[in-house]
Image (cartoon, rainbow, N blue to C red):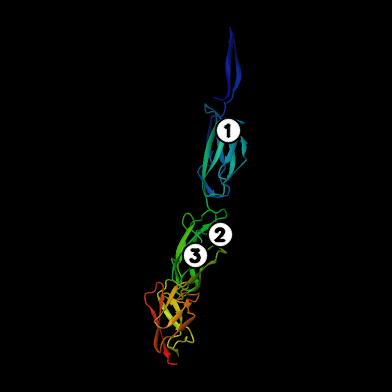
Amino acid sequence: MAGHDSVIVSSGPLRRAVAVTVSAGRPSVIDIVTGERQSGVAGGALTEPVVARVRDAYGNAVVRSSVNFRAESGGNAVPATATTDATGSARVLWTLGPLAGTQSLVVVADSASATVEATARAGVMVRVADLEPIVRRTNAGDTVAVRLRALDGFGNGVAGVVFAFSVAAGGGEVVPPRVESDSTGLVETRWRTGTDAGPNALQVRAIQVRDTTFRLVVRTIGGVPVAVQLVSGDGQRAAAQTAVRRPPVVRVVDRHGNPVSAVHIRFIAALPSQVQPQELVTDDRGEATPREWILGAPGEQLLLVVAQGVRDTLRVRARALTR
């Protein structure tokens, strides 16, 4: 055992006590005295210093041994190198790295080493991120998935933040209207847009967190076409073999009555009348109109309008007059 002792030296009748000092050997074992299993905010300093004791192979404290401390995961140890005191101990202050989760501090003295672990937790929420970009254009009345994440200053997900959602424009509803972020900071809800095509807005607010109110905006358009309607041009009269004064205008709508664009339309003129062009695509107002409808022989005339995806056919009538 290291320390002070004496040995008896004898030669014949002579005996003499000689004082000796026994020093510890090379570092063989490192014990963590204090500072294990701590937890703190990511990027912050732990409250308790880490104290490591260095011993040789016989359990003796190794004095004046150089000890290196290396913080993993972007952390910091101060001092990075320390010298053991009379008890073989060295201490360090450990600042955690920016990532939430388990972090490690490696302690090395000569060939001996030990590892200390601590848990870094997320700090306070400072911003909100879209987990997935929200759609910017959808059909009126459709449901939009809203997935956000509450983040601290280092981008760690913050748990336990309550978000309030409310419809700010366009009608519809959001279910549920209040959601608490989970252990990863995730917040999920579903937003059913209004039935009228146009801008929709959802207001989002993190309760008890300042300056976190913002809006999500979606523009809705007409959805699946269900009907083709006559806007104008029915019941006209014109001389036989001439075009009607105002070509018919038709509109395709969805189940909410919103106009639907980009729908293929076929105009079918009952002989002997003629229509040009026979195929069109609805514009942004959901409308289509042929260039001309030329009537046939005197009498009733019929123009059929067929919209892609719409079951019923629209009938437009006119009368050809004797010249």
- Residue 295 point in image, percent of width and height: 43, 85
Residue sticking out furthest to the bottom? 323
Q: Residues within 10 Å of mark 1 (few under 14, many from 20)?
A: many
Q: Point out the tag, 1 or 2, that comes first from the N-terminus.
A: 1
Residue sticking out furthest to the left? 311
The residue at which mark 3 appears reads as 135
Q: Residues within 10 Å of mark 3 (few under 14, many from 20)?
A: few
Tell me the quarter of the picture where residue 87 sits: top right
Vertical placement of residue 239 versus 206, above or below: below
Q: Is residue 302 left or right of residue 95?
A: left
Q: Nearer the viewer, residue 104 or 46?
A: 104
- Residue 158 point in image, percent of width and height: 51, 56
Can you say which quadrant of the picture contains the C terminus? bottom left
Query: For the residues marked 1 and 3, what is the alpha-carbon distance in whole angstroms?
Result: 57 Å
Vertical placement of residue 292 versus 130, above or below: below
Q: Nearer the viewer, residue 91 or 190?
A: 190
Mark 1 vs mark 2: give the one in front: 2
The residue at which mark 2 appears reads as 127
Label 1: element kind: strand
Q: Amino acid at mark 2?
A: Arg
Q: Amino acid at mark 3?
A: Val
Can you say which quadrant of the picture contains the N terminus? top right
Q: Residues within 10 Å of mark 2 (few under 14, many from 20)?
A: some
The residue at which mark 1 appears reads as 109
* Residue sitting at x 60%, y 36%: 68
